[in-house]
Image (cartoon, coloured by chain):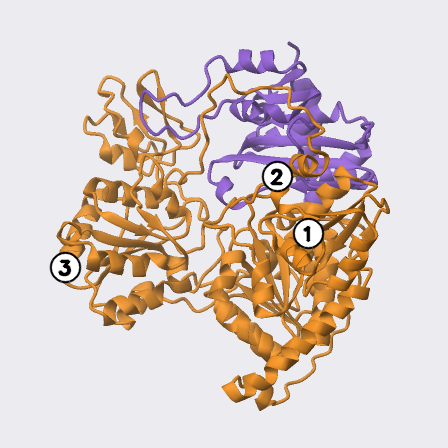
Amino acid sequence: MKQLMLGNEAVARGAFEAGVAFASGYPGTPSTEILEYLAQYENVVVQWAPNEKVGLEVAMGASLAGVRALVAMKHVGLNVAAGPFFSASYMGVNGGLVVVSADDPSMHSSQNEQDNRWLAKAAKVIMVEPGDAEEARWMTREAFALSERFDTPVLLRMTTRVCHQTGVVNPEEPLEAPARGYKKDIPKYVLLPGHARLRRPKVEERLAAAAAFGDEDDRWNPVFGGRADLGIVTSGVSFGYVRETMPTASILKLGLTHPLPLERIKRFAAGVKKVVVVEELDPYLEEQVRAAGIDATGHSLRPYSGELNLTLVEETLLGKARDKVTVSLADVDIPPRPPTLCPGCGHRPVFKVLRDMRVHVMGDIGCYTLGALKPLASMESCLCMGGSVGMAEGLARFGGPELQGRVVGVIGDSTFFHSGITGLIDMVVNGSKATLLILDNGTTAMTGAQPHPGSGVNIRGGPSPRLELADVCRGVGVKRVVVVDPYHMDDLEKVFEEELAAPEVSVIIVRAPCVLNERVTFAEPVELDLELCDKCGLCIRVGCMALREKEGYPEVLADLCNGCGVCVQVCREGALKIPEKVGA
Amino acid sequence: MEKDGITNVLLSGVGGQGILTAGRLLALAALRRGLDVKMSEVHGMSQRGGNVDTHVRIGEAVPSPLIPKGGAHFLVSFEKLEALRYLDYLRPDGVAFVNRLEISPLTVALKQPNYVDDIDKILEEKTPDLIWVDGTEMARALGDVRMVNVILLGALATRLSFLEDANWEAAVKERFAKPKIQEAVLAAFRKGPEACLSR
């Protein structure tokens, strides 16, 4: 029976149908749900890795053992996994290996907009690109077979609008994928220079064979329509916009986008007067099409950044959009509704204190990156997963006297396990005096509460060994490790000042459970005594959704307030109070 | 069904209001009617109290997932400010269903405007066909404020004549496993028309 599935759910379904035995990855929007859905299939071993690199390495081991394996990550995760990814290309596979990269055009939830199609080309692996949920299912299912046939990892390149698009899927029966067994093969699997040089021509032969396959295959690279005046070359989600804009135009839809089926593209181009390439982000297809001697346009007709939509594709192909926007919003000032820390979140008091101390915070990736936004506005950089640690070390060392003892790195627990540990080792062995704050809420909150090595549970909710952050920090040589509770802000500030003044590296673990994940309620909603309020606005400046302005005064929204008491602590007049519990 | 073959429904509101579930129910009802459907949503950052939009497109064949500005036949907004923010998605002949609820965005300082004055009047002036829905009030009366999403769907359903009662029932039964919840959801859904206020 036809089913409705999220694109990521359809990837999981396709992998299950292909008989996948192992899946790993690290959470990251928009890829996270792939592993969560795969964990619903009992016979698949599914696990979160500390980071993408480790996930891919375990999957390579599984592949060598002869079973089918999948690794899922967001686009920037593939940077972390680039080490094994580029060399796995030379090594090839035994059991089929699919690496999912979920790109994020428009940067809905990402720090950059990199187009990972280049990574397939650079690593010289096969790449497939689904455009909707049903394609996500069947392309994943078939990608394992391509991997085994051409002896290469396959990059399954998704984008936000494919990952988080729900559509109609036709599930098929699972395939039999018998384990192929491990076979020792030192020249293939040990990439010594002498062996790697022998593997190099095989990579080239395999790419030529895969291109020849794509040249002749109608399922992966279908042609639609038949008008001779215009031919459009496209792939992924862009196909839908093109098809809707010009239902009768000639369209070559590429499902295999590395290596490109250039002979097929040449044949297609020869049958039409003019060729336009419609693709999101970089001119990846267009540059190769033009380099092959085909006269094509595309990139110059659309924005260089951001995802496409129907309006943009209509403007590209028709010169103007079909739908007329008739409601003008130019005359109203609509206040933005930015994402914000939850009421009661343990990160809020930390950033309130850091702001008031005027220290320089090198930040990291997670919910707490919102500490950079007003009114907390106390984070001064956010580069990449784990980047806070090394950047704090560098800034502290070269920031001059005025930054002396005023630099802290702020990183979440999951991010620390992902790639903060190595930075901390660098601090220790190179004699840094910077301070690192690890915000420990026991989960990977930003992406929807996935467990990490410090959580003590696995992806299916079962028990797993729990690593204690303080032990890890001491284990890598940090002598000063303090654990604090964020909800007592006076103590927090005292500890921060002490550790910042310390003449060596120190780690402060700020521990409080994620209020959203654990559904934490501290007390009854805070009450405001209007008689005592002097309208100073300090409470508003802790940036809590449960407090808003009403006629110059703060107003507590009882539906949202969970009584954490942070605003109560900043009020100098005692106007905000936590009500006494009655009959508790 | 619309003449050009695709009906576009844009759902908007604030993270946590049950917008994804509403979109999913609508998409399931369309699927069980035998239609094609594509739905698009954004996860991640937007879940932290930010504005949320879900695009649902229904037709015999739906090639792409996003509704263009000026292309929505229906705008279903769970909150007034989020109705205003997405109003330019509505077609000239489009209908807006707006829940009578105001949720202020995060206030960063006193004396800074955090809402739009006279928002009711502005919405009414800018929307030729606007239907106010007392969804939150009705959900409270039913004893579960989370039901606001299905009450709004019930209101929308009065204008989606191509979907039959049986399709909605099938959708609810597919989405919720427990019979008790199915009953409560369907009861709230049927209250939708009653929650619509005349202007």
Tell me whether the residue at label 3 lies in contact with that at label 1, contact meaning CB atoms closer than 8 angstroms. Answer: no
Chain identifier of the purple chain? B
Task: Find residue A81 and report its horizontal and vertical position in percent.
Answer: 50, 67
**Residue placed furthest toward the right:** A226
User: Residue A236 shows which numbered tag?
Assistant: 1
The local secondary structure at tag 2 comes to: helix
Q: Nearer the viewer, residue A146 or A283?
A: A283
Q: Nearer the viewer, residue A138 or A320?
A: A320
**At 20% from the left edge and 58% from the top edge, which residue is drawn?**
A398
Residue for badge 3: A502
In the rendered view, tell whether residue A92 sits above or below residue A136: below
Given the image, on which type of amino acid does mark 1 rest? Gly
- Pointer 3 chain: A
The image quadrant where one finds the C terminus of chain A is: top left
Task: Give me the C-alpha separation between circle 2 and circle 1.
Answer: 24 Å
The local secondary structure at tag 1 comes to: loop
| Mark in the foreground, 3 or 1 | 1
Q: Quadrant of residue B175?
A: top right
User: Residue B177 shows which numbered tag?
Assistant: none
Is there one chain holding both mark 2 and mark 1? no
Given the image, on which type of amino acid does mark 3 rest? Ala
Residue for badge 2: B20
Mark 2 crowd level (few <14, some 14–19, many ≥20, 10 Å Cα)? many
Rendering colour (chain A):
orange
In the rendered view, tell whether residue A367 sits above or below residue B107: below
Given the image, on which type of amino acid does mark 2 rest? Leu
Task: Give whichever of discs 3 and 1 has the lower sequence position.
Answer: 1
**At 43% from the left edge and 55% from the top edge, which residue is drawn?**
A443
**At 81% from the left edge and 30% from the top edge, which residue is drawn?**
B4
